[in-house]
Image: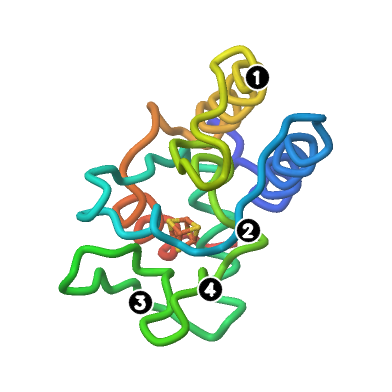
Amino acid sequence: MTPKPDLNEAARQVREIYAEWQRRPIDRACTGIADCCRFRLVGHTPYLTKGEALVAARAWRAAGRKDLVVPADGSCPFLHPQSGKCRIYDDRPFGCRTHFCAAAGGPATRNDVRDLIQRLEAIDTRLGGSGSINLPTAVRAALGWKS
Ligand code: SF4
């Protein structure tokens, strides 16, 4: 029988990847204006590996929430409807840290992120995943995992 993956260890490794990204001397400046969190507006939804979804789901549960509802305007379900802030900011997925946001410096280059993405993909494989899926679907699945 295949051993059950260690979800605590997977979450630790994902957070270490996020921390490593933040330590890199790459000029990024997320100002939290959250335009990139309005998926329909920008025409882009982040895709998450299983480890990223696990970390986001844990942050959501830690805030006392169980369900993930996509707002009618197509924004990210983690975006606070009144404050316009990310409600899991410290545990936001990798793509939210590196993707296209012009105000934050535009997309990170492939060279800047390749090794970290490979590590996220390796964790995804260990957790039984087969590649990134869109944020709401990935996190809803992770909310159902027993840890
Ligand atoms: S997880 Fe947070 S930073 Fe990422 S799109 Fe959603 S609200 Fe924005």
- Which is more foreground, mark 3 or mark 4? 4
Q: Which residue is mark 3?
A: 67
Q: Which residue is mark 4?
A: 87
- SS of the residue under disc 2: helix
- Which is more foreground, mark 2 or mark 3? 2
- Which is more foreground, mark 3 or mark 1? 1
- Which is more foreground, mark 4 or mark 1? 1
Q: Which residue is mark 1?
A: 112
| Marks 2/3: CA–CA distance | 17 Å
The answer to whether 63 is drawn above or below residue 97 in the figure is below
Q: Earlier in the sequence, mark 2 or mark 1?
A: 2
Identify the residue at horizontal 18%, vertical 69% (top origin): 73
Residues at discs 3 and 1 in contact (Cβ within 8 Å): no
Q: Earlier in the sequence, mark 4 or mark 1?
A: 4
**Residue 31: % across, % down:** 60, 59
Other residues around mark 1 within 10 Å, as few (<14) / some (14–19) / many (≥20): few
Nearer to us in this view, 139 or 71: 71
Amino acid type at image mark 3: Asp
Q: Which residue is mark 2?
A: 91
Amino acid type at image mark 4: Arg
